[in-house]
Image (cartoon, coloured by chain):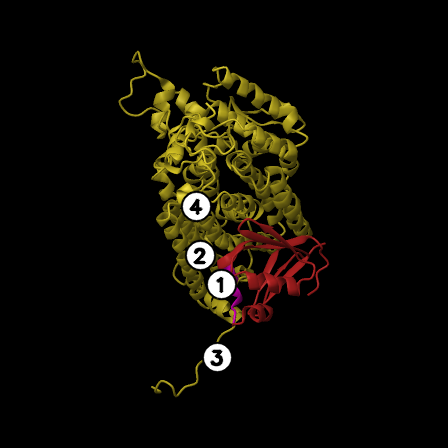
Amino acid sequence: MATTSTQPVFIALQANNDTMPIIEAIRQDNPNAVVHDYPAMVKIDCPGRLVIRRETVEEHLGREFDLREIQVNMISIAGNVDESEDEFVLEWRSA
Amino acid sequence: MAAEGNSKPAKKLSLKENYALLTRGLGWEPSYEKKEDIFRYISFEGVKIHDWDKWEDPFRLTMDAYWKYQGEKERKLYAIVDAFQQHNGQFNVTDARYVQALKLFINGITELEYDSHRGFNILAREFPGVGPRIAAQMQSLDELRHATTQIHTISQYAKYFTGMNEFPYQFDRVWYLSIPKSFFEDAVTSGPFEFIVAISFAFEYVLTNLAFMPWMSGAAFNGDMATVSFGFSAQSDEARHMTLGIEVIKFLLEQDPGNVPLVQKWIDKWFWRGYRLLSLLATMMDYMLPKRVMAWNEAWEIYYEQNGGALFADLARYGIKPPKRAPETIAEKGHVAHQMWSVFYGVRDAVGFQTWLPSDEEMAWMSEKYPDTFDKYYRPRYEYWKSLEAAGTPFKNATLPQLCQVCQWPCLFTESGDPTTLSLRESEYQGQTFHTCSDGCKDIFDDTPEKYVHAWLPVHQIYQGNCFLPGVDPTAPDFNPMYEALRYMGIKPGIDGGDYKGSADATNWENWTSRPANIHEGAYTDAVRDTANPADASARKTS
């Protein structure tokens, strides 16, 4: 699954109570992620690949989580998307 | 029939299985009609598709999930819209200059959502593959949602401020609204593949982050709870649309090597068309947000140079290059907002929103953000115009501008390497001369002149006498062509546009909120409360 690209992918989420556990999960699973705070919005950049793992979100949220719930609070993304029950991945494939 | 409860519940399908059943299981091969009779517009552009089943929506969104999450978004949005209306939220924005930007939004952008709804309806009908048809159908519903939520939300502002109550009428008639209108109508009258590359990829993937990220964040920063809510609600769909954009590009490129040059041509064309359209945001961000989050040149660096750079690096493996005219957009980033605002200020009596000269504080911000361009080229111009205003002889331009045959912007842009020379291009076609604003627009004209010679250029039409209401007599002794053309466009002369200071919006703002209509200039009227010296409100007046 490793990508050689270091080009930035990003996800931008509304800054609200729904997204706090998601942002925490992203920080935990993506040590290279950089979180930028803007008015009403959080933009998270990460070189090459960013993953949101359902289990990590559930740990922070304290309940079951369907990754498609992210869509309610998602503002924008950059990168190729691959979504399954367990992971939501953004990735660039070329260097 | 087994009694309920005796059978074990069926195993829950995985996301992939669910999506496969929806997009493969529900499709069928026609038996008594020929495929080419059903899908009539799929071959004339020259795109070759060998296997539509290779298309997969990476979100794998099924209809049940679509309705569930869309319903949730709507409930969330309307809870905020209700709260906004019930609590007089329209008075919580920084000042009424901000509202002038909303006039551009409702009159020029909301209709694009509706046009997009129509465009994706066509794709949902015309694409032979089930996966892309479903994605197009969902997007068509999304776009309709965007149009209706924007109209509902901004209707609250329209009750209190001028210039927002005639939006569908104005969209078809106002001279500068032909910029967005012609953009989308160019796309929707193209073939289905060009349309989807234009809108889903070039516009939504590459460019609309500029509208919905820094601009909406700026709306939030200026206290507009309503706009940021519909903006982010729309954008939650947009993230899905952007994914459709990148998937369609990859799909077309992987299906046949012959598609590569077609896709490259459409990327070059629609990146430039989209850039020209969206550079309106440059002036909205830098001049119309009383409190600013980010300058246009910074936004362009983040959202095009950095993120677009990553995107085109990824597409290089297919032989796709960055858009041909991207270097011009980078060269213009320090100029475009200032050049546009100057033109709007000059023709302020002929537009449906009010303008003002930037305050000293705003100019200081621009000097800081645009160290290479603002003080050298634009500050002297504003200072001169300020001195004319102070002398009681303000600068006004009573002549409507030359429009570009392609993007329909006034030819206001300068040469990439020389900000003191206007950029003008000419093409000959069938013995006539056609004018464009740039090499990017000239490329587009020269590639398909037979399409663009039909452009309905509002300024030409006004000067030809085609833009007056029935019963208007151009030979009458008191005939005023500017006044009559504005009435035709649905703009109330002297009310919707003109100078911000002294306008109905500015005066009403101070009467209704007791706060200054321009936070940088202090009070225009006695209605503003002087909190330091409540007994003497008029002491704070600046004029």
- Is residue B48 a member of the stretch shown in magenta? no
The front one of B71 and B84 is B84
First in sequence: mark 1 or mark 3?
3
Q: Which percent across, then down, holds residue B154? A: 39, 43
Which hue is chain B drawn in? yellow
Q: Amino acid at mark 3?
A: Lys
Q: Which of the two marks, 4 or 2, is nearer to us in this view? A: 4
B406 vs B250, left or right, is left
Element on which disc 4 rests = helix
Q: Is residue B311 above or below residue B129?
A: above
- Marks 1/3: CA distance? 19 Å
- Marks 4/3: CA distance? 40 Å
* Residues at marks 1 and 2 on the same chain: yes
- Chain ID at mark 1: B
First in sequence: mark 4 or mark 3?
3
- Marks 1/4: CA distance? 22 Å
Magenta residues span A64-71
Which hue is chain A drawn in? red
Contact between marks 2 and 3 (CB within 8 A): the answer is: no
The residue labelled by disc 3 is B11
- Chain ID at mark 3: B
Residue B138: which numbered mark, if any? 2
**Residue B442 seen from this side:** no
- Marks 4/2: CA distance? 14 Å
Q: Amino acid at mark 2?
A: Met
In percent of the image, x 38 and y 61: which residue is there?
Answer: B32
Contact between marks 1 and 2 (CB within 8 A): the answer is: yes
Q: Amino acid at mark 1?
A: Leu
- Please rate how many residues cluster around mark 2, counting C-alpha atoms within 10 Å: few if below 14, some from 14 to 19, many from 20: many
Q: Which percent across, then down, holds residue B185? A: 45, 39
In percent of the image, x 39 and y 88: which residue is there?
Answer: B6
- Is residue A70 a member of the stretch shown in magenta? yes
